[in-house]
């Protein structure tokens, strides 16, 4: 038989590829708890920063949606249009 026809035998199920986990060490728990607390603190900081940016964005959107209010009244605009020019053009 050629090697192409031979099938490799499957590994026995009793021996997994991964080594067994190390025995439980309670002293490692302190480091895990500290890291977990740091992650929670970092998440709280990011959350607060995100809320601040969202609030700022909401205020900017409200300002953008406000209609533009012209300070001049219609009477003022009419006066500006009817005002004669300061210098008259000389006719030739």
Image (cartoon, grey):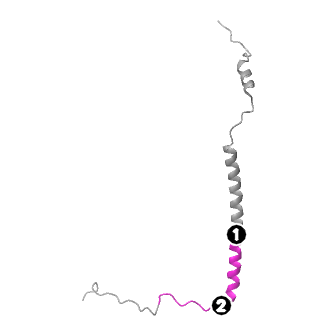
User: Which residue is the extreme one toward the left?
Assistant: 1
Secondary structure of the residue carrying tag 1 is helix
Please determine whether, in this image, residue 74 is positioned above or below residue 55: above
Spot occupied by residue 17 in the image (x, y as percentages of width and height): 47, 87
> In front: 64, or 8?
64
User: Which residue is the extreme one toward the top?
Assistant: 92
> In front: 57, or 28?
57
- Which of the 4 image quadrants contains residue 11? bottom left
Secondary structure of the residue carrying tag 2 is loop
Q: Residues within 10 Å of mark 2 (few under 14, many from 20)?
A: few
In-image side of 53 versus 17 (left or right): right
Gap between marks 2 and 1 measured at Cα: 27 Å
> In front: 72, or 34?
72
- Which of the 4 image quadrants contains residue 92? top right
The answer to which of marks 2 and 1 sits earlier in the sequence is 2
Please determine whether, in this image, residue 42 is positioned above or below residue 67: below
Find the magenta span and give its range. Answer: 16-41
* Residue drawn at the location 68% of the way across and 12% of the way down: 89
Please determine whether, in this image, residue 41 is positioned above or below residue 32: above
In-image side of 37 versus 23 (left or right): right
In-image side of 78 versus 2 (left or right): right
Spot occupied by residue 16 in the image (x, y as percentages of width and height): 47, 89
> In front: 17, or 84?
84
* Residue drawn at the location 69% of the way across and 42% of the way down: 66
Please determine whether, in this image, residue 36 is positioned above or below residue 75: below
Which numbered tag is attached to residue 25? Answer: 2
Q: Which residue is mark 1?
A: 42
Q: How many marks?
A: 2
Spot occupied by residue 6 in the image (x, y as percentages of width and height): 29, 87
């Amino acid at each position: 038989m050629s090697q192409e026809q031979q099938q490799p035998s499957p590994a026995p199920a009793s021996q997994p590829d991964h080594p067994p986990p190390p025995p439980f060490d309670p002293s490692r728990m302190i480091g895990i708890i500290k890291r977990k607390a740091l992650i929670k603190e970092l998440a709280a900081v990011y959350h607060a920063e995100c809320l601040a940016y969202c609030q700022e964005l909401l205020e900017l959107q409200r300002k953008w949606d406000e209609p533009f209010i012209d300070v001049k009244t219609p009477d003022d605009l009419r006066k500006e249009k009817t005002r004669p020019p300061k210098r008259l053009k000389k006719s030739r």
